Image: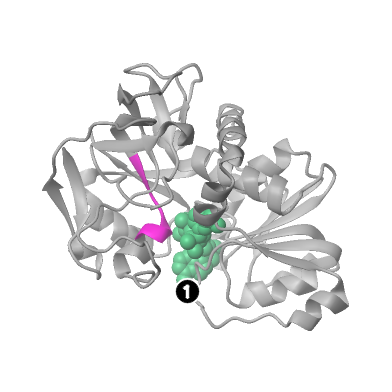
Amino acid sequence: MKAVSVSEFGTPEVLSVVSLPDLSPGPGEVAIDVTHAAVGLVDVFFRKGHFKDVPGMAQPPFVPGLEVAGTIRAVGEGVTGFKVGERVVSMSTGSGIGGYASMYLAPAHIVISIETRSIDPALGVSVIPNAAMAHAALTRVARFKAGESILIHGALGGFAAGFPGMAKMLGASRIVGTVRASKLDAANRTKLPYDLIVDSARLDDLGDEKFDVIIDPVGGIVRAQSLDLMRAGSRLIVSGNASDDWDQQLKSNDLWLRNITVSGFNAGAYLPANPEAIGPGLEAGVDLVAEGLGNIELELFPLEQAVAAHRRMEDRQLNGRIVLTTE
Ligand SMILES: NC(=O)c1ccc[n+]([C@@H]2O[C@H](COP(=O)([O-])OP(=O)(O)OC[C@H]3O[C@@H](n4cnc5c(N)ncnc54)[C@H](OP(=O)(O)O)[C@@H]3O)[C@@H](O)[C@H]2O)c1
């Protein structure tokens, strides 16, 4: 099979196309002929070696990539409910590797069929896994209720983009996003179901508005400023650090005095520990895409252009997601 490998931690140029042995599924697994592999900022962090000292993280050489779309090539022992040739999307195995390849192995429980829905596989792989994570984060961690309001930082980012549609499906009363000023044009034309998107450097424009839930995959200064946008009982879900600011701190006494909750959500840790959240999340993700609530901008690159795709991911001008294609 064809794959993109990280030969050593470093710049995008460490990515190169290699030939690897074909894969066959073990018990409980399916093998997928990959047509589309999503590119995420976390792939860039993995490639740079940001998490190289975290136990269990892949060391070079490894094939990056968390999420794929394609067709079932073979099913392993004990797998029911999938047939060869069926169109599917898989979310991450937890290890966060293996997706940038023409073939991928996944445990069957993290794979969902898109066979009977009119879903573009490039959009499906870009949105369904993130929407499934949004479902778990909102229903199980934030305990989001119909009628509540939500603020989503980095509103057009890949992970963030799963939240507005999911919040709408869960009955949100108001859905607001923040982006940097350079993304306001893209925010104005987004088809995602935001009621409003504001400049993250001008949060004062929100006036006295407060939110029940805030989703923060960005970190840095907007994380600290989020506390002023919360009312008693609000929940801030810390779910990423796109800003790469690892020094940002919140004061624990602020949580007490403001009567607010700050929770972490990391799907790579949460879903393996709570696998029963995966199926309902994936089903909700398919519904979200089928209902047109996840229509983000896509940029497609051939697998062979993974270096260019990672450069694009790092230029901070992306308004949606990058997808690698194998065909
Ligand atoms: N919790 C989870 O389970 C989970 C799952 C997937 C990803 N993540 C995390 O979520 C974060 C975002 O990942 P993603 O794949 O959604 O990335 P993405 O598509 O690049 O989106 C990141 C967003 O963050 C904002 N941002 C602020 N400072 C940035 C910087 N220095 N570089 C790049 N973006 C910056 C950008 O919005 P503006 O340009 O508008 O500022 C951008 O739209 C990462 O930390 C990732 O590890 C978490």
Q: Is residue 284 visible?
A: yes
Going by the image, does 237 lie left or right of 292? right
Which segment is the magenta one? 37-43
Residue 294 is situated, as x and y percent measured from the top left of the image, at 56, 38
Q: Is residue 209 visible?
A: no
Whether the residue under disc 1 has CB within 8 Å of ligand 1: yes
Residue placed at 19% from the left, 59% from the top? Answer: 61
Residue 194 is situated, as x and y percent measured from the top left of the image, at 68, 47
- Position of 267 relative to 219 (above/below): above
Residue 128 is situated, as x and y percent measured from the top left of the image, at 51, 37
Residue placed at 75% from the left, 80% from the top? Answer: 252
| Amino acid on which disc 1 is placed | Asp
Q: Is residue 226 magenta?
A: no
For the C terminus, the image quarter is top left
Residue ID for mark 1: 244
Q: Secondary structure at mark 1?
A: loop
Residue placed at 56% from the left, 66% from the top? Answer: 218
Density class for disc 1 (Cα within 10 Å; few <14, some 14-19, many ≥20) is few
Count every numbered label the image shows and give the total: 1
Residue placed at 78% from the left, 44% from the top? Answer: 172
